[in-house]
Structure formats: C-alpha cells, structure tokens
Image (cartoon, helix red, strand yellow):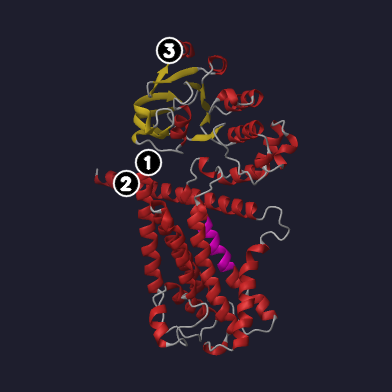
Amino acid sequence: MQQKIPIVHASGVTKLGTRHAASHSSVSIIFNEMTVTLPTDQVCAVLGRPSSGRTTFLRLLSGAERPDSGTILSEIRFSIISNGGTFFHPGLSGEENITLAARLYGMDAAMLIELTLGLSKFGALWQLPAGSVPGPRRRAMEMLVAALLPFDCYLVDDVERADSDTFELVLQILQLRNAGMIFTAHNPKFVRQFATVGSVIANHTIYAFPSVDEALKHYA
Amino acid sequence: MDRVLKWTDGLRSWMAADRLISGAIDDLSILRALILRNLRVQHAGNPLGLFVEFLRPVVVCLVHYFYFTLTRRTVPAHQYAIFTIGGFSIYFAFVTAFLGTFDGGKWPNGATLIPGVTRMHLRVARVAWAFLLYVGFAFAVVFPLKLLGQDVMIPNIPLTIADFGMAAGLGFGYGLITSGIGTMIPALVPILKVTQWAVFITSGVYDSLVTMPYVMAIFIWYNPLIHLAEFQRNAYYPGYPTYLVSLTYPLCWAIGLILTGLLMNRALCNRKSQ
C-alpha cells in the first residue's frame, strides 16, 4: 500500500471574516496570502492570540470552510474539530451519537460504544441527551469519540479548555495508532507540555518552526 | 509502446471508475446514517416509533376515501381507494421532499462538522427518506385494503418506483430553487410557500383529468404532479385511463428543476465564499 505523505501545505491562502465588531468594518482579513507547511504525523501546536484565526485555520484544514483564495493540499484525512463546537446532536444521547459516527465510518457501532464507554469516566452521561450534558463534559466526550474514529490527523481547538485527563488519554490513543494532532493554544504552558512541533499565527499568516522552543520564542 | 499506453489508459480509467464507485458508496453510507439519525431524533421517546410516519398519509387517505364514497364523485372505474391513495401518496412524496430540501440544510446540529458530510447530504437524506417512505406506503397499504375486502392489486413495481422517484425529484428541485430565491430575497419566502397550496389543489388529488370539466383540465394538465398521480392510479389498476397524461412531461420538469436548483445552489455557495 502506498504511504501517504504526512504533511499539509497551505499555498497562498486568503480568508476573509465578516463583521469585525471592534473595527466596525464589515470585512476583516484573517489570513492574507498565507503559505505554510505543517507535519501531520506529530503533535503540532498552533499558537495564537484570541481572535487571531486559530479556529478558522482548523476549520480550513477540516474542510468545514473553504479559503477565499489559495489552496490547501494534503493526502491525509483530518478529523472532526474537537473542542471547537458540538458535533453531537443535542436531541440524541451520547451512545446514539456514537452510533451515527460508527455508521458514517463503516465501524461496528456496538464495538465503538463499548470501547468508548470502557475508556471514559462519564458513565451514565452517555445515556442522557447531549444537549443536557454540561458543556465541558460534552466536549470531552466528543473528543474521545473523535479519537477512536479512523483519521490520520486529529484537530483540537483551544486546548486550554479541554479536559486534561481526556486530552492525555487521547494523546495516548493517537500514539498507539500512529496518528498526528494539530492543536491550537494561546498558553505556552500547554504547548511546552504536549507539542513536539510549534507554529505561530501572527500578521495574518502562520510561521512554522522546527522546534517548540523556537515557536515559543517567536510567540513571546 | 502503443500497447503499454493503451494498458495505462485502461488502468487510469479503471482507477477513475473505482474512485467514483467508492465515492458513491461513501455517499450512500452517509445518507443511510443521516436518515437513521433524523428518524431517531424525530421519534425519540415516542412509543409508536416509525409507525407515526405512516399515520399522516393513512389518516388523510381514510378521510378522503369516505369523502369520495359519500359524495359519489365521478372517478374512472369508481375505484375510490386507489384514486385516493394514488393521488395523495404522490403529493405527500413531493411535499415531504420539498420541505426536506427547503429546511434540511438549515439545522445541521453538528453533522456538517464531520468530514465528508455537507449540507447537500442533509437535504438529499430528507429527500431519500420521502421517496422510501411513500414507496413503502404505496405497497404496504395494499394489504390492509385487501383485508377490508377491497379489490386492490399490488402496484406495478417499476412504474411505482419511477412515479415516486419523479415526485421526490420534483420536490428536491423545487425546494432547492425556493430556498435559493429565499436566500437572495427573504421577503419572498412566504409567497413561495403559498405556491405549495396552489400545487396541491391542482395536483389531481381531488379530480381526474378524464372526468373534470374541459375548461379546468386544459390548465391543470400543466401541473406535472397530476401526470404522476394518474400513472400511480394506473399502477394499482391497469384499466385506469392514462391517455391524457405522459411520464415524459414530469420527467422533463424534474430534470429541469433539479439542474436549475443545483446551479442556483452552486452560485450561492460561490457568492458566500467570496
């Protein structure tokens, strides 16, 4: 079987946002002619200040949004964005949402439910409608389900908001299946703790660095 | 050398076909998952479950069956049961597909965050369910009618599938166009929704083209749903007259509406991303 090249390459990507409240303008520039290459088989941190476009970058990678110009090239399959909005239907229970995910990816639903429940600590919460589960718990449940689905690279938004136990468990799962992760953060502490490669969003573009220390130096 | 080039061309076209097939299988599994998700959400906590889906057409058909029988309306061959079921099931397939397309992509509830799932998948899932539900209804309804002593046959299978496919296709195309116009000019949405009633009244659920006054028939003939309703009645009862209607006419409408709707949808998507 042919090996996939474990990188993602954004070439001349421009993305505009609408209605920037602070500047009272109707259009804001999030990324301007951004060109960057990131590894997808490592744990890559994307550092950025609030409203710098971290979530938008992950949405561009996952295909949930398209760039206004430029292209994003990658052979690998990105996951659902964990922690960046709900992918569980609020009217269905956690278990029913797992069943949907299993059907979509051709997996055995009973096996996936058993695996998820066995690994998690949320017990009876899986039987409740997702809409009635408190936000942080639901995000943790979603992150765990996403980690058990067959993707090549996992996207996690705002790692500071993630449940730390679940995040560490997810990292272990990814290590076992040789998958990578791209996560966004604004706190250097988490980047130093988890990332192996770093990049920084600044001036409407992303700068990639070969090491976390260099990224942190640039971010400071 | 030529042989090698031919072989590589063959391999390339085979690989393209393979990609197309695996893409279609992926799309079908997405549609299946979304249909089942919609059903679970709609019937969560309902002890009757999926049976509720059949209740609406059953109740409407029963009420109209008694209405037609009591008023002794002139319908060809006096087959009130097939007259009612043929007309209403086609209209319901159309309107369910129309509303599914119109509303289907509005509340994705996280589904579009899942890689590979788009708003169009959500819409097509609703349309596919409309088709499956009413084809199922058209066949299932025969058995209780037989138990009640009605002279009803199992409908012609290819004709029934073609009829409901076209009804769902008309609803899909009309829904895409209506939601496209609604996105461009939101003030027009209530007016566009009212057109649904005009389509209902002229869809042949109350009258047959053969027996209605000529002055009415020459106008109502232009509604593609009446053609499908008449053919569906013919699928139940081969003696039912269909010489005034044609399957080509609704087929052309369905293709035209779907193509226009898809082009409109693409233009709106491009405009949004600019």
State the separation of the CA atoms marked 2 and 3.
54 Å
Residue A111 position in % (x across, y down) = 67, 41
Residue identifier under label 2: B7
Q: Amino acid at mark 1?
A: Ser
Per the image, label 3 sits on a secondary structure element best described as helix
Alpha carbon separation for disc pair 3 and 1: 32 Å
The quadrant in which the C terminus of chain B is found is top left
* Residue B102 appearing in the image: yes
Residue B134 is drawn in which quadrant? bottom right
Task: Write the start and end of the magenta stretch as one range.
Answer: B126-136
- Whole-Å distance between the Cαs marked 1 and 2? 41 Å
Residue density around tag 1, few if under 14, some if 14–19, many if 20 or more, within 10 Å: few
Pinpoint the chain carrying mark 3.
A
Left-right relation of A98 to B6? right
Q: Position of residue A148 (x, y in %)?
A: 60, 34
User: Residue B135: within the magenta?
Assistant: yes
Q: Nearer the viewer, residue A101 or A2?
A: A101
Reply above or below: B136 against A89: below
Left or right, B232 with reference to B146? left
